[in-house]
Amino acid sequence: MGKIIFYEDRNFQGRSYECSADCEDLSSYFRRCNSIRVLSGDWILYENPGYRGRQYYLHRGDYPDFQQWMGYSDSIRSCRLSPQHNGSFKIRICNREDFGGHTMEFSEDCPNVFDRFGYHDIHSANVRDGYWIFYEEPNYRGRQYYLRPGEYRRYSDWGASSPRIGSFRRVHYFH
């Protein structure tokens, strides 16, 4: 069970909305989101309704302005509670679509894709176990993409407009 509170203004001011479940469209609850308080659970926030657009992964804590969660704007329009996972992790990445080309399997975080994989681009991925976050830049920076177990035959399947991935990490459940 999770609980998150969205505030229209910075520093937890202005109109607020409390949420404890996935919400495909938050548009009717607030116009903008400038601060967030995560009381419990881990959350994936999306800039657009329907779990689309830029994604942000937040765990328990206070985020007094959108830069604190690496936000590009004050737009949050959908949210999803991340499932708890404390088991094993396994992901297979490929430098070509449909699992072609050079392939490598990981069970640990990767702070620099090029150093470990030898390529800058990941065109497809198969998440076999656990939940993962891809980052556009090395050292877990830049735009984020949340991947659940399943097959991603092309980078657009995880919501990216480019195959450029600089790093990725496992999503551990924070208590």
Image (spheres, grey):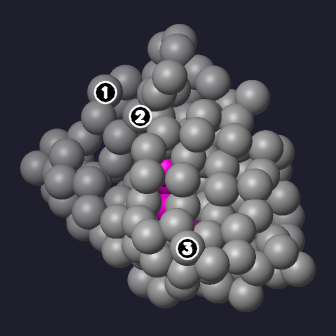
Q: Which residue lies at the image location 79% right of the left edge and 44% below the top edge?
A: 20
User: Is the residue under label 2 in contact with that under label 1 (CB below 8 Å)?
Assistant: yes
User: Which residues, given as a range, are shown in magenta?
Assistant: 54-58
Q: What residue would you read off at disc 3?
A: 13
- Depth check, mark 1 against mark 3: the one in front is 3
Q: What residue lies at 11% left-to-right and 50% top-to-bottom?
A: 115
* Residue at horizontal 29 percent and vertical 34 percent from the top: 109
Image coords of residue 32 (percent x, y): 64, 85
Please tell me which residue is depicted at 44% across the width and 70% down the height of the picture: 11
Secondary structure of the residue carrying tag 3 is strand
- What residue is shown with label 2? 170
Q: Nearer the viewer, residue 84 or 97?
A: 84
Q: Nearer the viewer, residue 174 or 125?
A: 174
Q: Report which residue position mark 1 lands on.
A: 108
Q: Quadrant of residue 130?
A: top right
Tag 2: amino acid: Arg
What's the magenta bit mostly, secondary-structure-wise? strand
Q: Amino acid at mark 1?
A: Glu
Left or right, residue 84 beside residue 56: right
- Indicate whether 66 appears above or below 123: below
Residue 129 point in image, percent of width and height: 57, 24
Sequence order check: which comes first, mark 3 or mark 2?
Answer: 3
Which percent across, then down, holds residue 165?
34, 63
